[in-house]
Image (tube, helix red, strand yellow):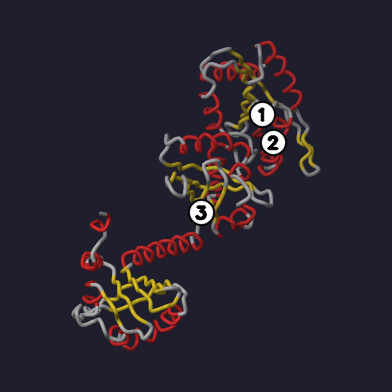
Amino acid sequence: MADRYLPSEGSVSRAVDQLPSMISNWNTDLVNIFANKAHAEFFDIEPSEIPGMHIREVLGEALYEWTRPYIAAALNGEPQQFDSVIVDLRGTERVVQANYVPDRIDGKIIGFTAMIVDVSRRAEAERQRDRAIRLFEIAMEHAPIGKAILMLDGRLIRVNNALCELLGYTAEELQQKTFREITHPDDVALADEHLAGVAAGKLGSISTEKRYIRKDGATIWVQRNAALVRDEDAGDVIIAQIQDITARKAAEFALERQLLVDDLTSLGNRRRLMAELEGLEGAPVGVLFVDVDAFKSINDRFGHVIGDQVLQALGQRILNNIRADDVACRIGGDEFVILLRSARSLEGVERLAGRVVELLAGPYDIDGTEVPMTVSIGWSWEPSAAPEKLLKKADERMYSSKRA
């Protein structure tokens, strides 16, 4: 009964003929016993003609010589698997994977069976993959700006040469750190917030300016652009580009200083004063309005150079005697305004005004020259006054003091 389910020799031959792979069988004299249709078509030989042909006739002299070591090994009982490039009848190079399997009967080798599979598509895909990897390596290593690959927990798993040079670490040292360890402490909280947003898919990408701490302890500013890359096989990672903008930030700070700082005294200027007043938002503040008495006579008597040095010295006395929350500004040639955020009452500001008059009075020793000087001062304090009202009240009291 079971014999009816056994395949006949003809059915096996038909099945093998339908396979796309080239299959053939050879005896120890390298004479063909069987070759399927794919094998015959590839070498442009009638299927009925291949049996009895020597393998050299089928493969051609060059390919035969190349495969002889593999044939010898197969006939020695060692299965062989190797890749080869062969040219088909149309002149197209095809990459094939060959398997030579020893053919045994009762332990004796009577030949070998060959199966040759066309893997050109796979080989091309691998070439494209290798090319993409190589291009990535080139872009990573030779990029003029820093590049890094991070895990979602912030660990640095790949860095390029530019980033190493920027931060002063070797690649091995950086790959043992997280981004938090190289981030300025004041920027860590915001960086963590951005990382959490990217990891959760709430932020598609990040573009921020932040500070890093170099290995030598120096602080640098960078433009950091990062994006999440999802990959089911390799796992999700973050790709980051880091560009040094320290010089640009220094220029911005310098420009900001020029806009808000008085060049002569290094106090704030009128623009800084107005910005501070507008930012009060109704908070209580005291104001001292200081004017140098008869400053023109100082310039006339001692010269403008010494006059400027007197103003510098006066500004320094103000800086040395105000609290960290207070702001001092020079708003005119010899006019100064001090914002007292620490003030709690008008009486307190008035008492302080009296002490400031004594503190700023001369004489001032300028390169051995004693320059006498007095100041007039006005004051105001309001728990929630408009900036114009505060300045006007202090200005009126200053002029009243000067007339007195």
Query: Helix or strand or loop: what does disc 3 sit on?
Result: strand
Residue at 27%, 85% (x, y): give it: 53
Q: Which mark is residue 292?
A: 1
Q: Which mark is residue 147?
A: 3
Which amino acid is tagged 2? Ile
Q: How far separated are the C-alphas under marks 1 and 2?
A: 10 Å
- Residue 367: percent from the left, percent from the top? 78, 44
Left/right placement of residue 291 relative to residue 1 reads right
Which amino acid is tagged 3? Lys
Q: Which mark is residue 298?
A: 2
- Residue 257: percent from the left, percent from the top? 57, 40
- Residue 236: percent from the left, percent from the top? 46, 45
Q: Quadrant of the N terminus?
A: bottom left
Of residue 9 and residue 236, the one placed in the foreground of this image is: 9
Q: Quadrant of the C terminus?
A: top right
Above or below: residue 169 compared with residue 357? below
Query: Helix or strand or loop: what does disc 1 sit on?
Result: strand
Of residue 300 and residue 290, the one placed in the foreground of this image is: 290
Residue contact between numbered discs 1 and 2, judged by CB atoms under 8 Å? yes
Residue contact between numbered discs 3 and 1, judged by CB atoms under 8 Å? no
Residue at 68%, 39% (x, y): give it: 307
User: Which circle's residue, 2 or 3, is located before the other in the chain?
Assistant: 3
User: Which circle's residue, 3 or 1, is located before the other in the chain?
Assistant: 3
Which amino acid is tagged 1? Val
- Residue 263: percent from the left, percent from the top? 60, 41
